C-alpha cells in the first residue's frame, strides 16, 4: 500500500465544487492500485483575503513544503483584484517551490465538438510547455507619478539563461517521448532583446537533440496556425506570457477551458509540484453544481502520473474519453444538462470503480 499526503486548496468559486470530484476519482482509482491519499485542506482563498487581509498565512509555504503534491481548485472572486489573488497565492507557490514548468495537455475527445472545423478527435493531441517563474511575469518595475497626467508604469521582462535552458530542455525531452516535434513560440522580429536570446538558447539546446524536429514560430502566426491547423502541433514551448495565452487558446480549440488540466512541475522534485485545472473560479456559475469537472479530474490524472502511478493515470484519462465517446452526458458548457456530481459519477463508472 502506497500513501500520499496531498495539500488540498479548494480556493474560490467552482474550485470548491470540482475539487471533491478530483478527490473522489483519486480515492476510487487509487484504491484499486493500492494507493491511498491523505488530504490536508487549507482555506487559502479570496474569502480568506477579505476576512484576514492575506490569501494565505506568512508561513504558508512551510505548511505545505513536505506534502507529496498540492491540488488547487481555483482562485478568484469579484471584489478582489486578480493581481491580488494571483500574487498572493499562485505565484508565491510556483516560485517558492521552483515549479518552473507549467504543463498543459490538450486533446480533442471523440464525442466533443470543437468550435474549430479542423480540430478532429484522434488528430489534435498536443502539450503546451510554459515557462512558469520568470519572463514577462517578473516583479521588476513600478509606477511613478500616480494620478498625474504624466503617470508612468514600467514592467521589465526577465529571461535568464538558466530559466530558458531548463524549460526548453524539459520540452525537448517531452517531444522525444511523444511525436518528436517541438514548436518554439517567439516574437524575435519585434521584441529585440529577450526573444532573440530565447531563440538562440532554443537552437543551442536543440542541437543536442537531433531526434527532435524543432521549428520557431512568431506568436501571432502561431496563434493563427493553432486555429487553422491544430493537428500539426505536438509540443509547444513558450515564455510565461506566450505559454499562458496559447494554452487557453488551444483548450478552447479542444472544446472549452473547462476541460483543460494543468500542472506546475518542479522537475527536480526538491519541492512539491502543484496541480490545478485551467478554468478558474467561474463566479458566474459558482454554487449551481454545473461546473465541468473534467479539467479537475484530468488534473488528478496528471498528479497520479507525477507520483509514479502511470497505469492509474491512464485509467482516469481513458474513463474520461469513454464517457464522451460512449454516452451523451455533457455539462452545460458543452451543451448538455449534466451536473458536476453526475458527470463525476459517470467517470467513476467508466473506470469501473463507481
Image (cartoon, grey):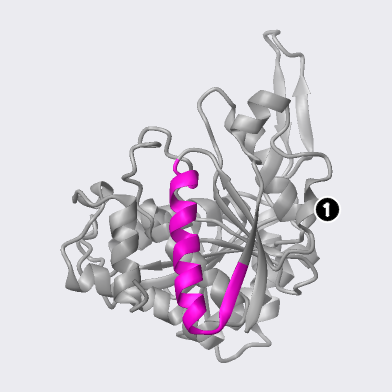
Q: Locate residue 322 relative to residue 247 in the image: left or right.
A: left
Task: Please tell me which residue lies in front, 68 or 237.
Answer: 68
Membership of 80 in magenta stretch: no
User: Can residue 333 be seen at all in this image of the molecule?
Assistant: yes
Q: In which quarter of the image is the N terminus?
A: bottom right
Task: Please tell me which residue lies in front, 11 or 136.
Answer: 11
Q: Where is residue 194 in the image (x, y as percent from the top left)?
A: 70, 54
Q: Mark 1 points at which residue?
A: 62
Q: Locate residue 25 relative to residue 99 in the image: left or right.
A: left
Task: Please tell me which residue lies in front, 114 or 28.
Answer: 28
Q: What stretch is highlighted in magenta?
A: 14-37
Above-or-below relation of 56 to 205: above
Residue 352 quadrant: bottom left
Above-or-below relation of 180 to 263: below
Magenta part, dominant SS: helix
Q: What element carries label 1?
A: helix
Membership of 33 in magenta stretch: yes
Q: Give the residue displayed 56% in from the left and 41% down from the top.
A: 75
Q: Position of residue 210 (x, y in %)?
A: 60, 90
Q: Position of residue 66 (x, y in %)?
A: 79, 64
Residue 344 quadrant: bottom left
Amino acid at each position: 500500500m502506497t500513501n500520499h499526503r496531498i495539500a488540498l486548496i479548494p480556493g474560490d468559486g467552482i474550485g470548491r465544487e470540482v475539487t471533491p470530484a478530483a478527490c473522489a476519482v483519486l480515492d476510487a482509482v487509487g484504491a484499486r492500485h493500492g494507493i491511498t491519499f491523505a488530504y490536508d485542506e487549507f482555506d487559502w482563498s479570496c474569502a480568506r483575503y477579505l476576512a484576514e487581509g492575506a490569501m494565505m498565512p506568512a508561513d504558508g509555504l512551510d505548511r505545505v513544503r513536505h506534502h507529496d503534491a498540492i491540488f488547487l481548485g481555483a482562485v478568484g472572486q469579484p471584489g478582489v483584484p486578480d493581481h491580488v489573488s494571483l500574487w498572493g497565492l499562485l505565484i508565491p507557490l510556483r516560485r517558492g517551490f521552483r515549479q518552473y514548468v507549467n504543463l498543459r495537455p490538450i486533446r480533442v475527445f471523440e464525442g466533443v465538438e470543437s468550435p474549430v472545423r479542423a480540430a478532429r478527435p484522434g488528430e489534435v493531441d498536443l502539450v503546451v510547455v510554459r515557462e512558469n517563474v520568470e519572463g514577462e511575469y517578473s516583479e521588476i518595475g513600478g509606477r511613478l507619478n500616480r494620478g498625474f497626467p504624466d503617470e508612468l508604469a514600467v514592467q521589465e521582462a526577465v529571461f535568464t539563461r538558466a530559466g530558458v535552458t531548463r524549460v526548453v530542455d524539459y520540452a525537448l525531452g517531452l517531444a522525444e517521448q511523444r511525436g518528436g516535434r517541438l514548436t518554439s513560440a517567439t516574437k524575435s522580429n519585434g521584441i529585440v532583446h529577450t526573444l532573440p536570446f530565447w531563440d538562440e538558447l532554443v537552437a543551442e539546446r536543440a542541437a543536442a537533440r537531433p531526434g527532435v524536429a524543432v521549428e520557431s514560430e512568431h506568436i501571432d502566426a502561431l496563434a493563427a496556425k493553432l486555429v487553422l491547423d491544430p493537428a500539426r502541433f505536438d509540443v509547444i514551448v513558450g515564455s510565461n506570457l506566450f505559454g499562458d495565452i496559447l494554452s487557453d487558446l488551444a483548450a478552447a480549440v479542444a472544446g472549452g477551458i473547462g476541460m483543460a488540466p494543468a500542472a506546475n512541475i518542479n522537475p527536480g522534485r526538491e519541492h512539491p509540484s502543484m496541480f490545478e485545472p485551467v478554468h478558474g473560479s467561474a463566479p458566474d456559475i459558482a454554487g449551481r453544481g454545473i461546473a465541468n469537472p473534467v479539467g479537475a479530474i484530468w488534473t488528478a490524472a496528471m498528479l497520479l502520473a507525477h507520483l509514479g502511478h502511470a497505469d492509474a493515470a491512464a485509467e482516469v484519462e481513458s474513463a474520461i474519453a469513454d464517457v464522451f465517446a460512449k454516452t451523451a452526458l455533457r455539462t452545460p458548457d458543452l451543451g448538455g444538462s449534466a451536473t458536476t456530481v453526475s458527470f463525476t459519477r459517470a467517470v467513476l463508472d467508466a473506470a469501473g470503480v463507481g
